[in-house]
Amino acid sequence: MANDHPDDQKDDMHDPAHEDRRFFLKQSVAFAGLSLAAPHWPLAGTDPDDVPIGNAEKVKLSLTINGAKKRLTVDPRMTLLDVLRENLGLNGTKKGCDFGQCGACTVHVNGQRTLSCLTFAVMQHSRKVETVESLAKGKVLHPLQEAFIKHDGFQCGYCTPGQLMSAVSCIREGQAGSAQEVREYMSGNLCRCGAYPNIVDAILEVKSKGLKV
Amino acid sequence: MEKRIFDNPADPSLDRVDGRVKVTGKATYSAEYAVPNLAHAVLVTSTIAKGVITGIDAEKANSAPGVLAVISHLNAPKVPGWGSAAQPAERAPIGTSFRVFYDHFVYFDGQPVAMVVADTHERAVYAASLLKITYQSEKHRTHFEANVQQAIVPLNVQRNKTSPFADYDRGEKGQVEAHIEAEYTIPTQHHQPMEPHAIVAVWEAEDKLTVYDKNQGVKSAQGQLAQAFKIPRENVRVIAKYIGGAFGSGIRVWPHTIAAVLAAKHVGRPVKLVLGREQMFTSVGYRPYTVQKLTIGASKNGKLTSITHEGIGQTSAYEEHLERTILASRSLYACPHVSTRYRLLSLDVNTPTWMRGPGDATGMFALESAMDEMAFALNIDPLDFRIKNYAELDQERNLPWSAKSLKECYVLGAEKFGWKNRKLEPKSMQKDGVLVGYGMASSLYGFHRHPSKARAVMQADGSVIVQSATMDIGPGTGTAMTRIAAKVLGIHAKMVRFDLGDSALPDAPGQNGSSTIPSVGSAVHDVCVALRDRLIEMAFEMPGFATKEKSQVVVRNGQVLASMADTNGVSFGDILKHHHRNELEISAESKSGPERDQYSMYSFGCHFVEVEVSPFTGEVHVTRVVTCADVGTIINYKTARSQSIGGIVGGIGMALMEESAMDHRYGRYVTSDFSSYHIPVHADIPPIEVYYIDKPDVHVNPIGSKGLGEIAIVGVAAAVANAVFHATGKRIRQLPITPDKLI
């Protein structure tokens, strides 16, 4: 797990600095796996009541959130979604199902659209996370935000942040060539109010204008 | 056509007033209020459908890290409004709202039976997994068809002979030269808004409660909570400024809301509860499983002679839920003989509730499918058949319509859709190897206007704050109200702020039954008229104005002008300044008058649907939809259009995919998430064209506007089913129309 990430940057996360971050993360993530799996899917030969918790509840990690580096101490069972919402107050990213089926929690991790409810925060250590809060630059809205307002691409607004983050990716990935293509590549983002046709119009307009997303 | 007063090329629609906060992620929904010292709750639900709880072993859960409490009927604080549980405890008689953590009885699978509260969500989830609950099961009944013989006349009707759901018979059966008889089934369907129900409950003092709760009526929630906890109404504050969809799921205060309030009392800390998606199947209501039998008789030349409509709806074992299922058949078409019967079947399930187009979406699937079947039997175009039986007055109440432009809707919709290209014979149209079908259906929904209050406060700078405790579950209430206020006051929409979703604001009904624009829109209109008139009076007390002719006065661009031609008036701000006022506040109440007894009031509409069906896989794709509605004045076309589109999308889901399936061995839903309960996705939805007649209904209210939210979905499922029949020659009477039913 920790080997996935280059460890060449200065380890400034711990105080006191005697801890070995690589070891600490490895151990904690292993514990996290156990403590999560145990209640629902007991591992062979593991007593579900004998689950390590306690000090394994705190894992330190760093994430770059919307361009700012954050050092966090989190319960390893926390999803990236819950860390954003509960620990960082970034409520723009929505919890719709917690099962990766609705897309309301879509964020970008290292530029890729990612369902933040399906990934533990600790799995994203050292990565760059971008949320809907990153789209507008000050008071200037992102072209897709403008287009969503113009085309009324939402009603209740709850799926909207996820739709927007997916829409950005949809265009960047080159999957917004036609209405049919947009519909296909946006189908992971559910909207119960039924704003779909307006969302498609908004995306196609931004794409056809060649605006930078 | 009358002048379009609200939406015309010279004065185009407003963008949503809350658009910016919604696209930037800054709109605050119920679970997102940052309250200090917040504890996190997790609901634990029953795993049997009927029986009693014999034990709750909370020892391990209680000693898990961070746990503040495990709450159940064994230790929950009392809800004073419910009284004490009988000893020995008895099952609740029908008509009793479910009382969470009250006694040991289990009424349905997925019933809230305990709650774990901890300092973090993760700790609460983990501790909840350690809870051991034992039950003694009893034989449950959840299967509709297996128990349908036990359906009864609702107790509610037995006790109230004037109930609209009582048996209804009108006229004599004329000569029946052709007839059809068919049974239609709608499975249980769930609202499943994208935002799960959530609440943050805060006891500010022993008898003072604030809740940030997802619901559709802050005032009714306030009343229900005050009643349950026996505290003064004004001590309860309910805030719901942004709601992530609801479609009816938030009309009631559900058990989980009470549970969270109890938990907050128990642990002495604010508590947050967010339902899991799987809990959204049993913690809130749903559109009930309903079976309907339609018998239609007609003359050879296509005149209706008889309609018999029988409906049996599902309800719980402790409460009756009645809805309009059979009512539309009494008034939509001209027909001398109409009989309706309505029955309820109690099962061991949670209580259903209103879901978009309640009753009518269900009933009109049956009626409008049956009308299509009758037209086919008569070899008449289904649209012509409807026009032949057009009701020029409401035969149920024997009253004229306040306004009805359904015929114009038919004509406009048919033209835009290209209905004339439809071949009468089913299975006669093909394209690229797929079967093509055209279907249509009518739509109607009753007009509801409830007493509503609004307050308008003119500020020193000429801007105005308008307030009412109304809601916005998505249709754009604030936008429409801003439009009305700006129009009446003659100011730019940017000078208006509309506040809603807070029980501390002036009384307004909840957002349901398509009543918001008719009710609150009228109150906003009336209060702004009163404010405008007061400003004019104050202007006339100023030098230079007193000599002017009052009847010539107009307001425009934030000024009172002596006449239309006047270009140099006095600004609202200057009027306040002259009178040494920092602000000017006016309140108003608006409600129906005697017109309710003089006219029959409905919104009307129709839908035209094109489907393509694969002859090999039975897969149905809706490829084109035209919808047309007559709802009086359109206040804001852009947001109205979105609401109509949303109704079509919901109707496509209802027709083609939505089904809450139960494993009756356990009385448990097997559809528990979006991978098993399918709702439409982007790829399922084609472009949708929306048209409005946009003619004020002068009898209903001062703005001439009727409700839109419900008629947007009513009839859509029938239009899809009728299109599928036209494409394939197969009549599917049991929703959803899945491929297995077509191959």
Image (spheres, coloured by chain):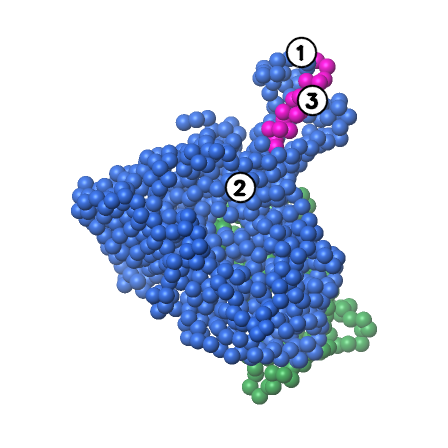
Q: Specify the subunit that label 1 lies on.
A: B
Left or right, residue A165 beside residue A9: left
Residue shown at the point (31%, 48%) measured from the top left: B169
Q: Quadrant of the N terminus of chain A?
A: bottom right
Residue position for label 2: B450
Q: Could you tell me the amino acid type at mark 1?
A: Thr
Q: Nearer the viewer, residue A163 or B111?
A: B111
- What residue did someone put label 3 on? B538
Above or below, B531 against B267 in this view is above
In the image, taking residue B639 as reference, residue B561 lies left or right, namely right
Nearest to the observer: residue B441 or residue B421: B441
Task: Let me know if residue B530 is in the magenta part.
Answer: yes
Q: Earlier in the sequence, mark 3 or mark 2?
A: 2
What is the secondary structure assignment of the residue under circle 3? helix
- Specify the colour of chain B: blue
Front of the two marks 3 and 2: 2
Secondary structure under tag 1 reads: loop
Of marks 2 and 1, the one in the foreground: 2
Residue B547 numbered tag? 1
- Marker disc for residue A51: none
Instruction: Tell me the magenta residue range.
Output: B527-544
* Residue type for callout 3: Met
